[in-house]
Amino acid sequence: MKISKVSSALRKLLPVKYCGAVIVAAGNASRMGGIDKVMAQLGGEPMIVRTVRTFQESNVIREIVIVTRPDLIDKIKELCADFTKVKAVVAGGADRAGSVNNGLKALSKKVRLAAVHDGARPLITQEVIDRAVRTAHIYAAAAPGVPVKDTVKIVGGGVVEATPDRSTLQAIQTPQVFDYDLLKGALKKAKDDKAAITDDCSAVERMGMAVRIVEGDERNIKVTTPMDLRIAELLLEEMQ
């Protein structure tokens, strides 16, 4: 066995800090054409169930909190009743940052790492979760990413202002994993500053903290439109 493979095997045997997952599924699915994406059927079961199951079966995730709309709390509790790691299902906040913060508060005091994942990314794999958590265990902040394929333009007033070097661009996925106290502090600072953040990494980056990027998975798509749901069905068939 090559040294790199030995190192990888040994790393996976090392214990990681106690990690709790916050699965955010509190959106109103405004782009789904009337389909409630949290409950949308994927492979014969609600999408949220498939998402949560992967975290339930992960060796590096110790507990789970699901954040959702108030009208779905009881239903999701019922659907996830057999998932022993699910400790709470709580209502979301006014925005994503507020929803994540509500989830963080519902985690137990044992938690040292927090993995924040989009409930609408049902094709997340054990491998991606493992890479992100183990990297955050060492560096305090990690997220999966995949290289951008398309040429990206910075546009202002309908005119191209710049073309970033595509080789430096990555599309960032979830779970994004952080030291618990770091993420709590970063979200509070963003709220106090009334700063608009697009993801949890953005809040941590504002604190001057480097976020390590690990290998993501192109199948780990976020379902935001009916077309995304159809693509997810096709990808799921290939994965099974």
Image: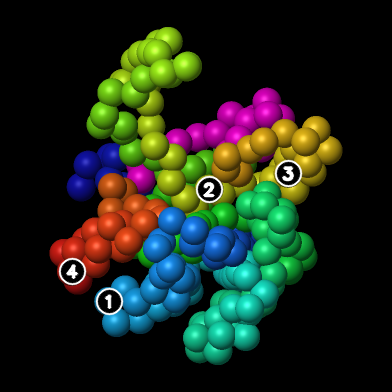
**For the residue labelled by badge 4, is the local secondary structure a helix, a strand or a loop?**
helix
Q: CA distance from mark 4 to mark 3?
A: 38 Å
Q: Earlier in the sequence, mark 1 or mark 3?
A: 1
Q: Which residue is mark 2?
A: 176
How packed is label 2: few (under 14 Cα within 10 Å), some, or many (20 or more)?
many
Q: CA distance from mark 1 to mark 3?
A: 35 Å
Residue 204 inside the magenta-drawn segment: yes
**Residue at (46% x, 71% y) in the render:** 36
Q: CA distance from mark 2 to mark 3?
A: 14 Å
Q: Nearer the viewer, residue 116 or 13?
A: 116
Q: Earlier in the sequence, mark 1 or mark 2?
A: 1
Q: Nearer the viewer, residue 36 or 176?
A: 36
* Left or right relative to 180: residue 15: left
**Residue at (35% x, 81% y) in the render:** 45
**Residue at (28% x, 40% y) in the render:** 3
Q: CA distance from mark 4 to mark 2?
A: 26 Å
Q: Which residue is mark 4?
A: 237
Q: Earlier in the sequence, mark 2 or mark 3?
A: 2
Kind of residue sitting beneath label 4 = Glu
Residue 232 position in % (x across, y down):
27, 62
How packed is label 3: few (under 14 Cα within 10 Å), some, or many (20 or more)?
many
Q: Which residue is mark 3?
A: 187
Q: Which residue is mark 1?
A: 43
Q: Earlier in the sequence, mark 4 or mark 2?
A: 2
Kind of residue sitting beneath label 2 = Gln
Q: CA distance from mark 1 to mark 2?
A: 25 Å
Count of numbered circles in the view: 4
Q: Which quadrant of the structure image shows residue 237? A: bottom left
Q: Which residues are magenta?
A: 201-216
Kind of residue sitting beneath label 3 = Leu
